[in-house]
Amino acid sequence: MIESYPQPPSITGWLPEDNARMFSKLLLTLVVTVLVAVYLRKRYQQSKAQKTSSSNNSLPVRSTGNSELDSFLSKARDPSKQSSGTATSSPGNLAVKIKAVLWTVLAVLVVSGGVASYLYWQDQQRLVTVLLHRDASEAPVIYRVSKRNLGDNEFVTENGTRVTVSANERMEVVGL
């Protein structure tokens, strides 16, 4: 007599094994993305702080009797004092807009790629019915197979049985 022992509970518990692998890959990708974003943000803020401190110190300070020259130099040292009625946008403002557009395009590409990958993976997990006709007079043998396990002349059932279709058999897939 063969005794069967209960299977130990899996780590993921509520997820099937294939779904758990996909879920862990998604979590790993998310963690790496967040870490890179935090690192780049910190690096950007440090370089920005260095640029502002070095740009304020690099402009010479002169004291002259000409008030127009003093106001021009003070505006050059502190861009916040400039009037907002300029006819053209500053190169820094244009760079910010281009950067925002590029980040948006990158985000759209990453999200659309992730959605396409998820939808493909989800479609491959779908179960289909395979009817295997051996003789014209007999009823077909019915198997349940996930779509990813279908091959040209073979397939693997949901319980792990590998079935190879011979030349005199006909395989019919229902549910594609």
Image (cartoon, rainbow, N blue to C red):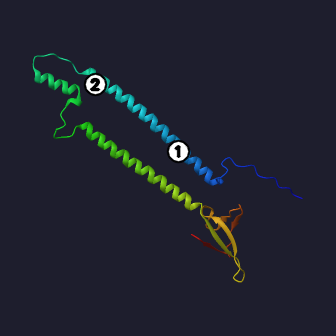
Using the image as rendered, state which of residue 36 and residue 154 is in the foreground.
Answer: 36
Q: In the picture shown, does residue 47 fall above or below 94?
A: above
In the image, residue 87 lies at what x, y percent?
A: 16, 40
Q: Which residue is mark 1?
A: 29
Q: Amino acid at mark 2?
A: Ser
In the image, residue 172 lies at what x, y percent?
A: 62, 74
- The image quarter in which residue 52 lies: top left
Image quadrant for the N terminus?
bottom right
Q: Determine the residue located farthest toward the right in the rendered image.
A: 1
Q: Residue at x 11, y 24 (%)?
A: 68
In the image, residue 138 lies at what x, y percent?
A: 72, 81
In the image, residue 132 lies at what x, y percent?
A: 68, 74
Q: Residue at x 46, y 53 (%)?
A: 113
Q: In the picture shown, does residue 144 fall above or below 68?
A: below
Q: In the shown orientation, is residue 119 left or right of residue 42?
A: right
Q: CA distance from mark 2 to mark 1?
A: 38 Å
Which element type, helix, strand or loop, lies under badge 2?
helix
Q: Which residue is mark 2?
A: 55
Give the number of callouts.
2
- The image quarter in which residue 136 lies: bottom right
- The image quarter in which residue 126 lies: bottom right
Q: Residue at x 22, y 37 (%)?
A: 90
Using the image as rendered, state which of residue 64 and residue 101 is in the foreground.
Answer: 64
Q: In the shown orientation, is residue 93 left or right of residue 87?
A: right
